[in-house]
Amino acid sequence: MEEKQHIGQLFDRIAGTYDGLNHGLSLHIDKWWRRKAVSLMTPAEQVLDVAIGTADLAIAMLRSGKAQHVTGIDLSKQMMAVGKSKVEKGKWKDRVDFVYGNAQQMPFDNDRFDAVTCAFGCRNFQDLDEGLREMYRVVKPGGQVTILEFSYPSNRLVRALYDIYFSRVLPWIGRIVSRDKTAYTYLNKSVKAFCWGEAFVMHMHDAGFRDEQFETLSLGICTIYTAKKW
């Protein structure tokens, strides 16, 4: 998908309206998705949050006590700027570090982190397998990876409604609010083109992870994947 070659720039353009649109368009269900993902995490000292964006997942981990310190990496400087502002307002400044970089070539040592997380970032990787292998490389043996990602509903009626919303309603509202013609069209395309469920688990297994599990949320609109490095 051509947009993935410039994914950082795409998210830079919509950073200012990203949180408001995401929460509004999902009727704030996305907040519950993150809390649910955090609830499935094993408590960890040092957590790497891949595609940290505006830091919603990082803040949720810190609030819950599931992480003591979060290092986030992202290709969008503007998204991280929004995240930094939120972290500072929430008095988490000393517990979150932001690193500009590519998730497929992360500047971290092997076995560096106690756990790795990623919310709505995997489908934006140019190479999913390379991104998962990097997650495996930087997490310590025994460490957990927790991934939250959009998926595609299996129920025909839900899928039909989902298609109408994601292909027509969401891009239209997204264009009006963000004034970007492509970003929310890309969201629809990227979800449809991405793998989910057992297919995604196979990619995790191929990257080296074991004890893979997944749980669908909101009639299959979103899925949480967990696995460990042994």
Image: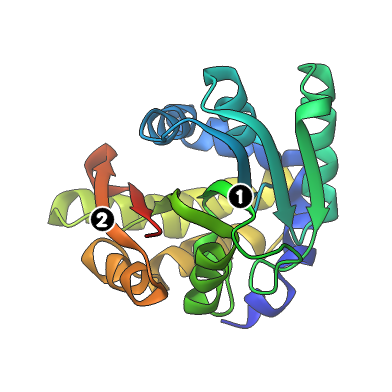
Position of the N terminus by quadrant:
bottom right
Instruction: First in sequence, mark 2 or 1: give its number.
Output: 1
Q: Is residue 61 left or right of residue 106?
A: left
Residue 90: where, in percent of width, then height?
A: 76, 17
Percent of width and height locating residue 143 = 46, 49
* Circle number at residue 211: 2
Q: Residues within 10 Å of mark 1 (few under 14, many from 20)?
A: many
Few, some or many residues within 10 Å of mark 2 (<14, 14–19, 20+): few
- In front: 4, or 156? 4
Vertical side of 164 occupied by 31: above or below:
above
Instruction: Say above or below: 39 vs 90.
Output: below
Amino acid type of the residue that numbered disc 1 sits on in the rendered structure: Phe
**Image quarter for residue 4?**
bottom right
Q: Is residue 155 visible?
A: yes
Q: Residue at x 41, y 34 (%)?
A: 42
Task: Indicate the amino acid at tag 2.
Answer: Asp
At x 77% / y 47%, what residue is drawn? 79
Residue found 31% across the figure and 70% down from its top: 205
Checking the image for residue 113, the label placed there is: 1
- Callout 1: SS: strand
**Is residue 20 visible to the viewer in this orientation of the structure?**
no
